[in-house]
Amino acid sequence: MLRRTLLASAAAATLVGTSLGAQDVTKVGFVFVGPVGDGGWTYEHNQGRLAVEAEFGDAVETVFVESVPEGPDAERVMTQMALEGADLIFTTSFGYMDPTINVAAQFPDVMFEHATGYKQADNVSVYSARFYEGRAVQGHIAGQITESNVIGYIASFPIPEVIRGINSAYIHAKEVNPDVEFKIIWAYTWFDPAKEAEAANVLIEQGADVILQHTDSTAPQAAAQAAGNVYTFGQASDMAEFGPMPRVSSIIDDWAPYYIARTQAVMDGTWESTSTWDGIGPGMVGIGEISDAIPAEVKASAEDMISRLASGEYHAFTGPINKQDGSAWLAEGETAADYTDDGLAGMNFYVEGLTAEIPQ
Amino acid sequence: MFGSIDPQLLLASLMVAATPIMLAAIGELVVERAGVLNLGVEGMMITGSVIGFIAAIKTGNPWVGFVAAAAGGAGLSLLFGILTQFLLSNQVATGLALTLFGLGLAALLGQDYLGVKAPVFPDWHIPLLGDIPILGPIVFQHDPMVYLGLAIVGGVWWFLKKSRAGLVLRAVGENHEAAHALGYNVIRVRMLAIMFGGACAGLGGAYLSIVRVPTYAAGLTAGMGWIALAIVVFAGWKPGRLLLGAYLFGGVTALQLNLQAASLSLLDVLTGIALVAAVVVIVVGLIQNRRFTAKMLWWAASLCIAAVFFSLYKWLGWVFNETLWLSSSPYIATIFVLVIMSSGGAPGSLGKIFHASR
């Protein structure tokens, strides 16, 4: 009790201090799950942070803490940032969801933005990108270039975002190659290069010649390169240094426009709690250059799919699609809704044809 | 029976997966046997990984990378040695600080090397031995560092057990005042041990960035140094058990990834392991004792009961998060086996500050 009072008064003191001392400078904090040099997920969030600095110059001050574990320790880091006078805090991993909500409740005057979660509050917005649109393109390419018909998938944690990615990639690989099989490894980590490389090697040893990853480091790319004749896709960042082989394309997260817009909103005092979920169309999801290591007609059809996804003409989850147990999910021509039961936001089932089980 | 798993490749990848932990752990074992607790293994590992990587890129020669990594790790540990041995700082705090420092230093040095590819470090195909069917590809067709790591473990075992210098080192670790009274230079022994530990940790880190991954990313070691520290403790400060612990950890890690990719059921595998272990207990017991003893029957019976339990659990269809258990299995298996075997306590002077005037 005493501790809470102390924290609160310290917070009040700091906030007063900030508003008196540095009236014009907006302080923006970032909590990162991996190191900014991971070459993937956190790297791109940090690029967004740098874009905010470049846009506003001296009018903003940004701070970040990297490699923050998902869990109670994240609350400590966020609390520290809020106490040090941050006006806006971006928490950039799914596992920060509850910590963000908890800390936000203690600091009603600080705005929070949580990436990839689904819990909002008056001062907590959520934002995410429709990575599954990029996964659709990956599946479309992977299904056509695989010769062994085995596609390896390095998954991180069994959360809706990851499951959506697996389903989307599988549906579109199956569409172009009915014999395709997915082998899925759950790494239970976002970032552990040695383990990711190990997982890639195991998948390759078991016959996979295309590796998709939902972990953050470039290790699977390097492992695939060492193995030779294996295709990969850059994850979260372009990972172009591994092209044209093994990396044949990539999903690029572009957070910069969103971060700039939200920082601007805090400066203008127009910030409101919102839920943003943008895909290829608005540019939050980018598809990296498709390399010439794959056949030209595959490249052309993938580019066609990208433009249809971007224009909204095609939805990555368009029926008929059954769930893994054979029950109907989407009827012919029906597209998946975002927030209903069985909607995309809370997706916790595989689609028909995947043989593995979701850990739960 | 094994699904899509190739047992030969699995056993081969075990040796590679175990090497970085083994290298870091064997260095720390020597340090702790000399009575010094260096918690900076993670920092020295990652510094070694980045320095080795940069040297290997610059020269195009992985061997230069490994030498540089060992030197870098030893250099960083020298800092720890000066602080704790001459300036008598607290070893736990200094070790933790060394980890933080190492992580930061590596991130700084490695900035320009993210996503760069390491030069190729070819596997050795050992003549004759490598041609043995089955065994050859598993044991004798790896890169030289795998064998260097094993040689270091063997050398440390011999050094501690058989050599006079090893006896002095153990004496310093068990009771530094007695060793000092006998005229041994405690500080010098410890400084050398600390630098050996740093060099080994550096090698382990470089093995990750040059061979295992093979690229550099910030935070490459992702906690492996802490696992190495834990293995030293669970191995009871004995090189043989340390080898077992590192291989067990590396092996179960490779195994669990294989099981996941092949979608084999963990409960089936556990049933199989328990039954095979029961047979092994009976056979080994018969060979050793030439008759059935109560103890071996008890072990075999408990293993069979465990097997029945696992298959019953699966048959009943109770809730069981396969993947979660698989992911934690390397930690559980290593701790379980080493604790069952455990004996021998920590070196008597471990973590204590020595000053000749006291």
Image: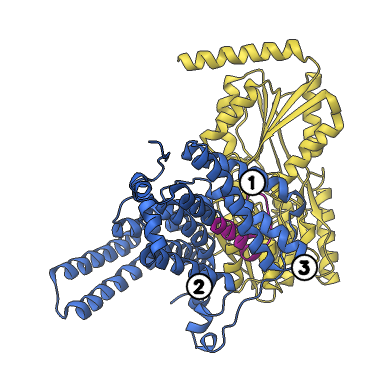
Chain in blue colour: B
Whether residue B208 is in magenta: the answer is yes
In the figure, is residue A47 to the left or right of A223? right
- Magenta residues (range): B199-222
Query: Which residue: 34% across, 60% down?
Result: B337
Identify residue for label 1.
A344
Q: Is residue B234 visible?
A: yes
Query: Which residue: 42% across, 65% down?
Result: B159
Quadrant including the N terminus of chain B:
bottom left
Picture coordinates of residue A102 (x, y %)? Answer: 55, 27
**Callout 2–callout 3 Cβ contact below 8 Å:** no
Q: Which colour represents chain A?
A: yellow
The amino acid sitting under disc 2 is Leu
Identify residue for label 3.
A245
The amino acid sitting under disc 3 is Met
> Closer to the camera, B4 or A224?
A224
The chain letter for the residue carrying disc 2 is: B
Identify residue for label 2.
B10
